[in-house]
Amino acid sequence: MYYKKSFEKSFFYVIIMQGDKKMKNYNLLVNDEELSDLINTVDKVSNLVLGHGRGHTMFVVDTVEYILNRLGYDNHTVELGKVAALLHDIGNLTGSSDHALKSAEMSEYFLDKTTLTGYDKRMIIQAIRDHSDGVEIDTPFGAALLIADQSDYKKDRVLLTITEDVWYKNLLEVEDIEVIVENDKIFINRMVTDKFCQHTMDKNKEAKEMYFLASDYLDCDLQLQTKSS
């Protein structure tokens, strides 16, 4: 029994270490104190309406990982997606205007701490730069980043709850978001209260267009659904 337990412990230790090795660059960045402080600071910027700090960042990281895994992409692609998601909003320190470009520029510094190839770094930077408009989707992880980022519109991200903007007020009626991938279909389910207005939500036409551009790149059918919470 002693040998069996020892073998099992060793076996699972190897599996864990292999997993860590496969994601070594992501793990390096997610544990980087300088980057962690920067992500935490982003949510404290007073002129933002939507939170872009740790809560949103980790939602996007987890959702990108989930989408790519469910669609059968390799571990390297998944890691590049997680790195891009981790860095995608770090330029939001001065507000959302041009934050994708600023995030892409700032990401170079942190990517230089990794052992990623020059090509991988360029693709990550490009995905970050494109994540707010979707005009140049070049990678599967860039498409997954767009879908994950645009999905995270819900009440716990609204920082300025007292606002005259009807669209942002409507987000307070979105209790949660659920992303489900089944075969070649991606479902974005919004859990909403009875005060939620779909017409108001649909005014954000750019987000809707990006959903479908990204899903087309992934050869998936995307469906937006609303459910009562």
Image: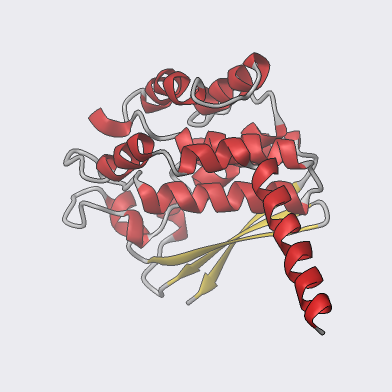
Residue 207 visible in the current orientation: yes
**Foreground: 158 or 87?**
87
> What residue is drawn where x is 73% and y is 36%?
76
Left or right for 131, reference 197: right
Task: Report the coloring of the rendering.
Answer: secondary structure
User: Which residue sits at x=79%, y=42%?
Assistant: 73
Q: Is residue 123 above or below residue 84?
A: above
Determine whether 91 is above or below 119 in the image: below
Residue 198, above or below 122: below
Q: Total number of numbered labels?
A: 0
Indicate the position of residue 57 as horizontal and vertical percent values: 44, 46
The image shows residue 195 at horizontal and vertical percentages of: 36, 70
Residue 7 spot, x, y in % from top left: 81, 69
Picture quarter with the N terminus: bottom right
Q: Is residue 95 above or below residue 184?
A: above
Residue 148 screen position, x and y as percent: 56, 47
Q: Residue at x 27, y 45 (%)?
A: 43
Write down the quadrant of residue 180 in the picture: bottom right
Query: Could you say which quadrant of the image residue 44 lies in?
Result: top left
Residue lying at the far front of the rendered structure: 2
Q: Is residue 208 visible?
A: no
Asked whether, in this view, residue 8 is left or right of residue 160, the answer is right
Q: Could you tell me which residue is drawn at 24 percent across and 40 percent down?
A: 48
